[in-house]
Amino acid sequence: LSILTLHGPNLNLLGQREPGIYGQLTLAKINELLQQEAEALGVTLTPYQSNHEGSLVDAIQSALGQYSGILINPGAYTHTSVALRDALLAVQLPTVEVHLSNIYRREEFRHHSYIAPVAIGQISGFGAESYRLGLHALVQHLKTAAS
Ligand code: DQA
């Protein structure tokens, strides 16, 4: 199984960006932890970060035929992007949405996700652990679906 991990806007600044909300770990470190977890699970993982909505749409479109599933933190595009949602609907790849912070205990504009209704599920509020839990859930889902 091969997983595409997508990180949306401003996540390249993790470690220095609002550490009280998003934690101390850099994106490189999170990707490293995910890589270790992927190896333990026996899957391959490819990380990609972009600050650009269209680049993320391109990455989702290119995932078709290349990856078995998508682990995505859409960042602020979670709350705005019909285009990302439509791209996920177009490729129909099993997707898990993750957030470092608990978006439901923050500002009201973060309470709505355009992505959640097209994802298998969402994990929010556990910091870097959200990604690890999300990867586990996605791989479990894919293995169950394959058997
Ligand atoms: C985020 C939550 C979003 O509301 C925010 O815009 C982000 C990060 C998170 O991981 O907690 O950029 O997706």
Image (cartoon, rainbow, N blue to C red):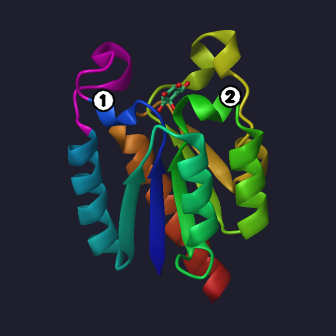
Q: Position of residue 1 (x, y in %)?
A: 47, 81
Q: Residue at x 52, y 33 (%)?
A: 75
For the residue with label 2, is its CB less than 8 Å from the closest atom of ligand 1? Answer: yes
**Residue with the mark numbered 2:** 79
Q: Where is residue 112 in the image (x, y as percent from the top left)?
A: 73, 26
Q: Where is residue 144 in the image (x, y as percent from the top left)?
A: 62, 79
- Magenta region: which residues? 15-26
Secondary structure, mark 1, is helix
**Residue with the mark numbered 1:** 13
Three-letter amino acid code of the residue under disc 2 = His
Classify residue 58 as left or right of residue 125: right
Image quadrant containing the C terminus: bottom right
Classify residue 120 as left or right of residue 98: right
Q: Residue at x 47, y 69 (%)?
A: 3
Residue in the foreground of this view, choosing between 18 and 133: 18
Figure quadrant of residue 35: bottom left
Q: Residues within 10 Å of mark 2 (few under 14, many from 20)?
A: some
Tell which residue pokes out farthest to the top in this image. 107
Residue 38 falls inside the magenta stretch: no
